[in-house]
Image (cartoon, grey):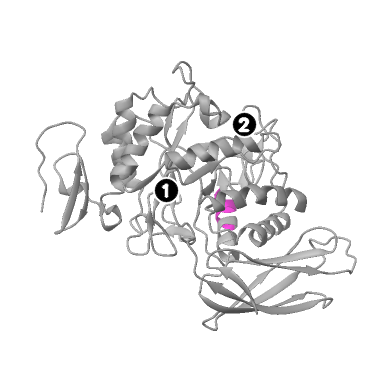
Amino acid sequence: MSKQVKQWDRFEIEVENERHYRDAYRDVALTVTVTKPNGELQDFWGFYDGGTTWRFRYMPDQLGTWSYRAAFSDGSVRVSGEFECTESAIPGVIGAHGANPAWFGYRGGGATLLRSFHVGDRYFAANWPDSERAKFLDWAGTQGYDTLSIASFLLNRNSEGRGAGWQTPALWPLNPAEFRRLETMLDELARRRFVVFPFAGFFGRTSDFPLARGDQELFIRYVLARLGPYWNLLFNVAGPEPLLRPDDFKCIMMWDDLERLGRMIKTLDPFDHAITVHNRTGDDLFRDEDWIDFGTIQGPKTTDQVKLGERHALNHHRAKPMYSQETLWSGNKLHPDYSDDDVRKNAYVMLMSAAAINFSDNGPPAGEGKGLSSDGFSGTLALDDRNQDRHDIVRRAWDFFETTSYWELTPRSDLVSHGWCLADEGKRYLVYLTESKPVDVLV
């Protein structure tokens, strides 16, 4: 009887190769051809996992019988087999919602708001106790969060006040043991149904990413072989803000580099993970690029809801979802002093703009002083440090939107005299006003 694997879960085989290689990452490749239940062929590759062990992973998206043929490029070992893909509760890879691509949705068909919370650099750190990580996840799940923006993920942001001091997995130069440590925690996130947005991307600011082009492709291929079969990952080429401070990216993450690497990731990834670039404050410079699947904007950081709505409208590609990343970060020193009303109103305006909110809690519980992306509760993840009222305000906005069949509507503020409107024109209109006064709706 063939092995059974749940749809959107991971199929994996282990392949032993006793032949000695000077450089197992470069001297040989484990190439694999997969045959899908519908007869379509898909080429992929395995990865070296230390010693004499290679592995091959795949994420099946079709129910039925799959088969595979795997061989080393030097002809040393060949294996083949099959497995059965069965139904599961996993929603599928996240990307644009099929029926209305202005919103996020899962490949399995459902739409999602992405209830995102930004955490700093400690999440994957070995020197942050597993017990504390579990407490945070328990709270985040109960709070309704389903997405975590995690700073030091693929690479450590080794700078003071960010990733310095946190023993996050050191994935480059390639180290299978470090990847396995990361995967243990990523498995738990997948089990709890959390999506991960890598804040610093494949090539992060002040991190130890590969510099040579050949090494960059090797890193991308290895990451895709190991982590590509995870359904719960969004992809980010580089961040944060590679075009804002080129020196922090060693001046090799300029526009042409980002486009080259983004297209490479997009072309090599057989699972079609949604990909973006983390933009600096202002417009989404990558909005119309054909290899970008969703926009990531930062800002405007404002308590002026009209300005907030206008910038979202100008930057939202109608055929791509939008991730509003560093736009509602309570207690952040680069943001204004949000009142509770500001947090509530901004959250509604962002949702009325069909934007996925990434919330952050960077201020101390007492409300005095401000922090950056790895400060406050978003930095410590200690539950006593959270500003619970702010989390509850944003949650109530999300909870309301879940009652509206929002995925059937698109932003149409041109149909109202003021305020914001989501509409299925001629059928349904949802209007939000920040003040109580009459509004004209063009129906």
Q: Where is residue 343 in the image (x, y as percent from the top left)?
A: 34, 30
Is residue 122 among what the camera can see?
no
Q: Can you tell which quarter of the image residue 338 is in?
A: top left
Query: Is residue 297 or residue 289 the one in the foreground?
Result: 297
Q: Is residue 378 left or right of residue 420?
A: right
Q: How crowded is mark 2: few (under 14 residues within 10 Å), some or many (20 or more)?
A: many
As rendered, which of 244 and 155 lies closer to the eye? 155
* Residues drawn in magenta: 255-260
- The residue beneath circle 2 is 162
SS class of the residue under badge 1? loop
Q: Where the N terminus falls, by quadrant?
A: bottom right
Prevailing secondary structure of the magenta residues: helix
The structure residue drawn at horizontal position 56% and vertical position 70%, both measured from the top left corner, is 60
The residue at the point 39 percent across, 64 percent down is 109
* Quarter occupied by residue 103: bottom left
**Where is mark 1, residue-wise?**
114
Q: Point out the image quarter for the C terminus.
A: bottom left
Q: In the picture shown, does residue 84 fall above or below 328?
A: below
Snapshot quadrant of residue 119: top right
